[in-house]
Image: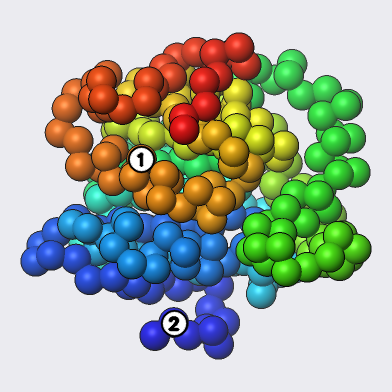
Amino acid sequence: MKSEADLRPVSVERRTEGGDGGPKMLLLHGLAANDSVWDRLLDGPLLSEGHEIWTARLPWRTESIADSGREPHLREWLARALAAVPGGADAVVAHSMAVNVLLDLLDTQERAGGDPLREYGIRRLVLVSPFYRSDADAFDWDTISYYLNDFHLIMEEGIRVHADGRLSADLLQAMGCRVRDRVGPQGWLRFFDLYLGTPELRLDRITVPTLVLAGENDFAAPPAEGVALAGALPHGTARVLSGCGHFPMIEATERFAAEIRQFTASAAAPAALFPSSAAPAHRAAGRPNALEPQR
């Protein structure tokens, strides 16, 4: 049973039973969300076949978002979550800003002489709706203006997909602005600072197979950025899911789960993780005209 009263900055919870000695999977939520973002995915055996599923509750969740904005770095909190899974998580699935915190953690520890993938036992990564740009010059004043002035729309989108049509447009707008105000300027700065740092990440050091999942209609983290991120990784593969926005685990739960199941079950070489019967994968494209939504 999940505990809604857990006020610790970081906690993890086992959500499904795995087979004896089976691999573990840790799910990491994004900014101003919480582990309930995975509930639809975990309602039944869609994802859990062969895996023991864990979810994390992180400081940037809805309940404690105002406090997390005061932290200069968020990677230490994520390190606690990774270390809290008994025996380590074989696969880590991160969504939205959690992708950026995770990449920041791996990069920082590797630069310090560590081997974080081995330390945490990570053998596979799934990065969902990531914010990524490969070139510092890609950040201009228009970019900053968009993510600052329209930040409430990203918050509103999360509420909309959770509500599943039950809220009016006016109420959605009001709630989106309220969540934005709870994130506050400090929380926004933590998010955008991580985004600004993506061109400096040494992604060539992430040597595990990595699946990048993006939504075709994601206005927060454009799918072209996910494709570019996959192309920058040694063993990265991008999949763009049609008809989805920033929350494909809710908007296209079965397709989302199928992509992860196929990816984690594959024993093929990274360049051939998806057989020919599957929809074609994008690799090392990194350009908007390379997008081909997966249906």
Of the residues tagged 2 and 1, which is closer to the observer? 1
- What residue lies at 13% left-to-right and 65% top-to-bottom? 19
Estimate the x, y position of residue 237 in percent, counting from the top left: 39, 26
- What residue lies at 22% left-to-right and 71% top-to-bottom? 17
Estimate the x, y position of residue 177 in percent, counting from the top left: 87, 61
Mark 2 to mark 1 CA distance (whole Å): 26 Å
* Residue 139 location, quadrant: top right
Question: Mark 1 or mark 2, which is nearer the start of the sequence?
Answer: 2
- Residue type at mark 1? Glu
Could one spot residue 186 in this view of the protein? no
* Residue 274 location, quadrant: top left
CB under 8 Å between discs 2 and 1:
no
Q: Is residue 204 left or right of residue 21?
A: right
As drawn, 180 above or below 36: above
The colour scheme used to paint the residues is rainbow
Tell me the tag on residue 259. 1
- Residue type at mark 2? Lys
Q: Is residue 50 left or right of residue 229?
A: left
